Amino acid sequence: MKFMSYIASFLLGIVLFAALSEAAAVDAANEEPVCICPRDFEPVCAANLVTYPNRCMYDCKRQDEERRGRSLELLRSGPCDE
């Protein structure tokens, strides 16, 4: 009887793990990237006409876009004209 309860607990654990893993993958696809960048303010303008505080933040966003199958080009140093 103990053996059956161990098997049932094990199977329940596998099902819960699979469900939580899929939920985490869906959340990860929709969230913004986590970037470890300095707080230097040297703005750059990207092709999406967003001014990023510095090149590091732009690179982080560009890599996230590439992961999603899109591209993001750097237009110039300095803020985008609004």
Image (tube, rainbow, N blue to C red):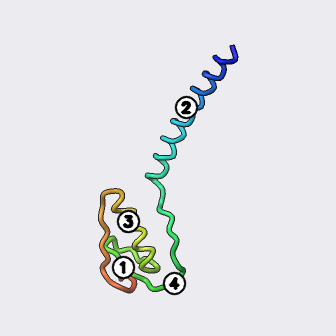
Is residue 37 shown left or right of residue 77?
A: right
Residue 2 is drawn in which quadrant?
A: top right
Amino acid under label 4?
Asp
CB within 8 Å, label 2 to label 1: no
Q: CA distance from mark 3 to mark 1?
A: 16 Å
CB within 8 Å, label 3 to label 1: no
Is residue 66 shown left or right of residue 20?
A: left
Give the mark nearest the N terminus, 4 or 1: 4
Residue behind mark 3? 63
Q: Which mark is residue 45?
A: 1
Q: Which mark is residue 14?
A: 2
Amino acid under label 2?
Ile
> Residue at coordinates 32% horizontally, 77% vertically from top-left?
74
Q: Residues within 10 Å of mark 3 (few under 14, many from 20)?
A: some
Give the mark nearest the N terminus, 2 or 1: 2
CB within 8 Å, label 2 to label 3: no
Q: CA distance from mark 2 to mark 4?
A: 46 Å
> Residue at coordinates 45% horizontally, 80% vertically from top-left?
54
Given residues 80 and 44, the one toward you in this image is 44
> Residue at coordinates 39% horizontally, 74% vertically from top-left?
50
Secondary structure beneath dot 4 equals loop
Secondary structure beneath dot 1 equals strand
Q: CA distance from mark 4 to mark 1?
A: 15 Å
Give the mark nearest the N terminus, 3 or 4: 4
Q: CA distance from mark 2 to mark 1?
A: 47 Å
Q: Which mark is residue 40?
A: 4
Give the mark nearest the N terminus, 3 or 1: 1
Q: Is residue 20 above or below residue 40?
A: above
